[in-house]
Image (spheres, grey):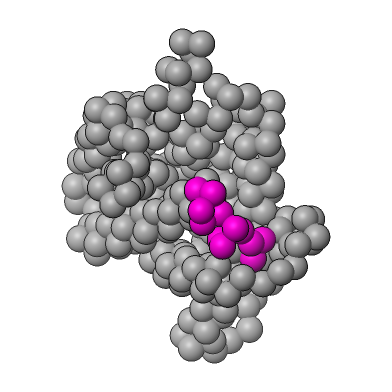
Amino acid sequence: MGLMSSLLAALFVAFSNLFMRKSIDSGGTTKAFLVIQMSIATIVAFGLGPVKTGSYDVNLPILVLGAISGTALAFMLSVLGKALEKGPPGLTFSILSAATVMPGIVMALMFGFPYTIWHGIGSLFVLGGLFWAGRGLEGMQDKKRWTFLVTLMFSLHVLILVIYQWRALLLSNPATAEQVQSQWFMPAMYGSAALIQLAIYLRSERRYPHPQEWLFGALGGVFNSLCTFFLIQATEQATAIQSAIIFPLFSIGTIFFSNIWSQKLYRERVNWRACQVCAFGILLGTVDWNALLKFLSG
């Protein structure tokens, strides 16, 4: 069930990605979409965190960490929206998902996190797959602008994922677990992202969202929340061996499902072989091989 929940989470986030693109197609922008989506995500995070657990104790350092993460998330989503307006949606979301291989490298360099040769090889496969996929963009208008945007988007996503893993590292350490234990991290992250997106929208748009933006923003928020729910379910339902591949499977599923709708609805020329190389690299580069081999050996 853990793996099925992970795939369902990938499917729902792919739908959320689709509704972001649909918001652009309807004549709107991603700014209103992101305000609505992040507002719904904040409500869901509050429900799955403090309300579900009954823990309302406020931890100021965690609130600050959540706000920092939310700031990075808000700007990453803004850059993502601009990249979608300039380039192919399938490849854009594939690059976003491929960022999952980088936090392991950063954590290994900064904190001595376990890192094997297979993780390094996996990262090279991901970069090679993305480079291969990008070779089909010759002649694309605004290619330089799009390349800059997806590079910035990729970097911001890596920063967010590093913060996630750093917090997880602190939670796993008995000496620091009590200091960082709080249910307010996710609500603070999504709440600050929603406020920043609202400020960006009010400053740049100065108009009331039209009905299509409300519709796609609400759908994007609902499907994003379903993704969060099923990802949490995946971590709770997974067996020991499944836990090692939940998040790689989620990333691979997101790439696959996002490219499916991009190809079918927008006639994007998806390089499936390059996607397979990326998927293989994500599998190699993000699975906890030491834990998996230890479990298999008994």
The residue positioned 56% from the left and 54% from the top of the image is 177
Magenta residues, as a range?
173-184
Residue 3 percent location from the top left of the image: 61, 27
The residue positioned 56% from the left and 61% from the top of the image is 180
The residue positioned 52% from the left and 84% from the top of the image is 199
Residue 26 percent location from the top left of the image: 56, 65
Left or right: residue 202 compared with residue 48: left
Q: Between 288 and 220, which is closer to the camera in this rendering?
A: 288
The residue positioned 71% from the left and 69% from the top of the image is 57
In the rendered view, would you say 288 is above or below 100?
Answer: above
In the rendered view, would you say 273 is above or below 44?
Answer: above
Residue 297 percent location from the top left of the image: 46, 10
Q: Between 179 and 109, which is closer to the camera in this rendering?
A: 179
Can residue 232 be seen here? The reply is yes
- Let me know if residue 48 is in the magenta part: no
- Let me know if residue 182 is in the magenta part: yes
Can residue 41 be seen here? The reply is no
Quarter-of-image position of residue 46: bottom right
Q: Quadrant of the N terminus?
A: top right
Residue 60 percent location from the top left of the image: 58, 75
In the rendered view, would you say 61 is above or below 280?
Answer: below
